[in-house]
């Protein structure tokens, strides 16, 4: 396990790293049998919470969710839209784990959420960039479905999550500097939608800097233009500014016709009953989760007391026979697993019966009945967004160079971009380190001048 955790091995042979780490089950069991009681009690609470989380994730991932639609972008990226329970809330920059059985029955992959639960009550969207064998097969499958020109194809996925921060921390800043490298723009799509949905006294000013290799990668901006440019008008009011840098291409000849960067829409077969992503791990169920932990721990203590009274106490009581300590710890492991299984299974059965009653009265949201034609998309989703395509002809698209972060921070300070600026960076490690270094320099100068404060936040998904 330790050997496969070394970074070069982990990055090159990730599946080997992933599957060998499932040996933690054997390691934990044998460790509990060999260490002394004091050390075992020290780690018991962590083992309890970990097993409870794993069992909840097992229940959530056991049901499949139908994928409603997909949008194919010119940069070999796709956006998938799934149905979710309206009570499932999540924070921007959250991720979900997806397993698509048609592609692989074993592999789970994390993806950033591009939608906002404040805007899309019953749907959740993720963007997937084609960068590996699994994503390549998914892209080819969806593209083949588009070429078939039919809606007979059905696509399902198992979902875990969402997982993310506890709060929308970016809303406490009066201005936001969002720096994205390539597909790192995906978490910012959710942030921009969240800002649009909030009823704030003053909307934060946003400067979005996106760095891509090729011009076609700018088509990812299609995913934010409809909501922000058409509906909220943030750009026209001066609250949103986009600066794009295309590093590996020269400026195009504007007299030549513009390439076709419109995306393609694939609607999958969704007739019948489709499960939604359940609200097991959302942010609105913290009280429920705390109650579940407390009840499970009480059941664990009761079971442990019963096992001790049946097996340990009769042998130890009024005798010189000492019950083996490793068998005591084995009873603790057994009581822990039984307590979690009994409590969580009872909760799942109770929720299932509740859903059945609600379904009988027509108030159930754990499943959704989808009819043919019920997923008609707006006009901008059918043909793409022209505002995003026009960005390719504007002066805020720079070709053949990388952004000068020192100059960008200096400009923000001179133009009084804001007194309290949140700097969020999502992209390669090298870019994050460069921005962090510049941010530290300006923070030290801001301490002396008391004009502007930059607050650095890293959004990293490196393994």
Image (cartoon, helix red, strand yellow):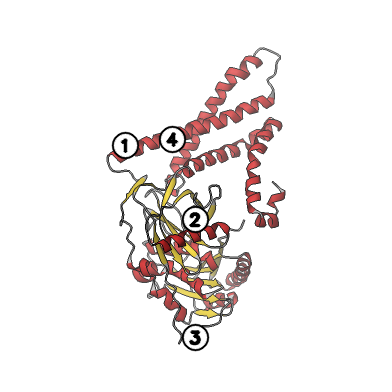
Q: Is residue 399 left or right of residue 5?
A: left
Measuring from the top left, give residue 157's x and y in whole percent.
Answer: 46, 50
Label 4 vs label 3, nearer the camera: 3
Q: What's the CA distance linking mark 3 and mark 1? A: 64 Å
Seen at 56% across and 74% down, the residue is 409
Residue behind mark 2: 94
Crowdedness near tag 3: few (<14), some (14–19) or many (≥20) residues, C-alpha within 10 Å: few
Q: Quadrant of residue 197?
A: bottom left
Circle 2/circle 4 CB separation < 8 Å: no
Seen at 58% across and 80% down, the residue is 400
Measuring from the top left, give residue 309's x and y in whole percent.
Answer: 58, 18
**Residue 393 can be seen, yes or no:** yes
Label 2 vs label 3, nearer the camera: 3
Q: Which mark is residue 347?
A: 4
Crowdedness near tag 4: few (<14), some (14–19) or many (≥20) residues, C-alpha within 10 Å: few
Residue behind mark 3: 253
Outermost residue on the top side: it is 318
């Amino acid at each position: 396990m330790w050997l496969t955790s070394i970074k070069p091995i982990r990055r090159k042979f990730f599946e080997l790293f992933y599957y060998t780490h499932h040996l933690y089950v054997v390691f934990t069991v044998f460790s509990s049998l060999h260490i002394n009681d004091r050390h075992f009690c020290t780690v018991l609470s962590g083992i309890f919470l970990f097993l409870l989380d794993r069992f909840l994730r097992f229940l959530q991932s056991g049901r499949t969710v139908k994928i409603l639609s997909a949008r194919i972008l010119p940069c070999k990226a796709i956006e998938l839209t799934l149905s979710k329970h309206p009570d499932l809330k999540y924070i921007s920059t959250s991720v979900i784990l997806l397993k698509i059985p048609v592609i692989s029955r074993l592999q789970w992959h994390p993806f950033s959420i591009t939608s906002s639960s404040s805007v899309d009550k019953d749907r959740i969207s993720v963007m997937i960039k084609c960068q590996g064998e699994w994503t390549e097969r998914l892209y080819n499958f969806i593209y083949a479905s588009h070429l078939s020109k039919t809606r007979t194809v059905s696509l399902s996925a198992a979902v875990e999550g969402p997982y993310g921060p506890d709060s929308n921390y970016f809303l406490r800043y009066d201005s936001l500097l969002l720096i994205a490298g390539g597909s790192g723009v995906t978490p910012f799509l959710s942030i921009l939608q969240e800002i649009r949905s909030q009823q704030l006294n003053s909307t934060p000013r946003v400067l979005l800097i996106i760095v891509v290799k090729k011009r076609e990668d700018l088509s990812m901006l299609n995913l934010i233009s409809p909501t922000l440019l058409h509906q909220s008008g943030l750009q026209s009011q001066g609250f949103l500014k986009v600066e794009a840098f295309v590093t590996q291409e020269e400026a195009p000849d504007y007299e030549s016709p513009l390439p076709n960067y419109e995306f393609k829409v694939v609607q999958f077969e969704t007739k019948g009953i489709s499960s939604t992503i359940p609200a097991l791990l959302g942010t609105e169920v913290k009280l429920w989760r705390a109650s579940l932990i407390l009840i499970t721990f009480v059941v664990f203590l009761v079971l442990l007391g019963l096992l001790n009274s049946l097996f340990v106490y009769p042998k130890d009581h009024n005798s010189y026979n000492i019950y083996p300590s490793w068998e005591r710890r084995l009873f603790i492991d057994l009581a822990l697993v039984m307590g979690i299984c009994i409590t969580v299974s009872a909760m799942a059965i109770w929720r299932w019966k509740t859903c059945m009653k609600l379904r009988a009265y027509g108030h159930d949201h754990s499943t959704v009945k989808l009819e043919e034609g019920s997923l008609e998309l707006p006009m901008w989703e059918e043909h793409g967004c022209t505002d995003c395509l026009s960005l390719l002809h504007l002066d805020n698209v720079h070709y053949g160079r990388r952004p000068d972060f020192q100059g960008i921070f200096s400009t923000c300070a001179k133009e009084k971009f804001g007194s309290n600026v949140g700097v969020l960076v999502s992209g390669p490690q090298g870019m994050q380190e460069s921005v962090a270094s510049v941010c530290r320099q300006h923070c030290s100068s801001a301490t002396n001048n008391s004009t502007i404060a930059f607050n650095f936040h890293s959004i990293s998904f490196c393994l």
